[in-house]
Image: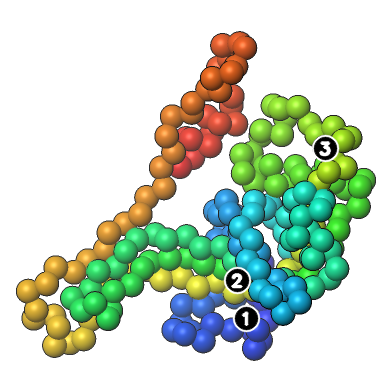
Amino acid sequence: MSNFEKSKRNTVKRVPKRGHYDRTTIYEVLDAALIAHVGFVVDAQPFVIPTLFGRDGDNIYLHGATKSRMIQSLEQGVPVCITVTHVDGLVLARSLFHHSANYRSAVIFGTAKLVPEKEKEAALKVISDHLIPGRWDEARLPNALELKATSILKLTIESASAKIRTGGPKDEPEDYDLPVWAGVVPFIRQLGDAIVDEDAKADLPVPESVLKMMQSV
């Protein structure tokens, strides 16, 4: 995969050595995330909305109620900034100033447009497969009324960057002699056992899509 061109908009300025501009790294960060924060401005008021999403190539799909503020604003063609972040650990230094976190983040820029009716189901499948691959084939598909109440936005990524921190604390040379513990407290993603719906009318086994998701973490 090629790199996104560095520009004033996407260049990492703070600790630039942590910046990444290749699609492989950026898309790995995106694809590992469940929630994206969608930023846009309406009448000089900034909004940042957390939402589920899916990616297909250079396109990100967002969905929501047809009359939601995010959908109605973004379909007008306003600039959009999407971010995702993973916290991989707390980095505890000898000084409070040098405490940090290990993380992976991605910042995406583009302009969204409405997905036409005939492409809605395919776009929704992208979002569904991003969350739980295979679930689309196990559940009832959206009916005409549900599709009408839902709008899908497609944002083609124009510019992007990722920023990643790994490793231990970086203290001042004189602080290494201090009797203060330093190190990393890792964050590990873990899924619990699947809980059946208490209103279920039949005793059904946990579906394959859920089992595979639990085994992959």
118 sits to left or right of 172 = right
Please state the horizontal and vertical placement of residue 43, each as a whole percent of the image: 76, 77
Marked residue nearer the N-terminal end (2 or 3): 2
User: How many residues crowd around disc 1 within 10 Å: few (fewer than 14), some, or many (20 or more)?
Assistant: some
- Of residue 70 and residue 215, the one placed in the foreground of this image is 70
User: Could you tell me which quadrant the C terminus lies in?
Assistant: top left
25 in relation to 176, above or below: above
Which amino acid type corresponds to the residue marked 2 in the rendered image? Val
Q: Secondary structure at mark 3?
A: helix
Asked whether the viewer can see residue 56, the reply is no
Q: Which residue is mark 3?
A: 146
Secondary structure under the numbered disc 2 in the rendered image? strand
Give yes or no for contact between labels 1 and 2 (Cβ–Cβ under 8 Å).
yes
Q: Quadrant of residue 176?
A: bottom left
Q: Which residue is mark 2?
A: 107
Residue drawn at point x = 62 percent, y = 81 percent:
10
Q: Position of residue 194 (x, y in %)?
A: 48, 28
Judge the density around disc 2: few (<14), some (14-19), many (≥20) Cα neighbours within 10 Å. Answer: many
* Marks 2 and 3 in Cβ contact (< 8 Å): no
Query: In this picture, is 140 found above or below 123?
Result: above
Residue shown at the point (61%, 62%) measured from the top left: 37
* First of labels 1, 2 by sequence position: 1
Residue 10: assigned label: 1
Q: Is residue 200 above or below residue 12?
A: above
Quote the CA–CA distance across marks 1 and 2: 8 Å
x 48%, y 65%: residue: 104
User: What is the CA distance from the residue labelled 2 to the residue labelled 3?
Assistant: 31 Å
| Front position in the image: 142 or 129 | 142
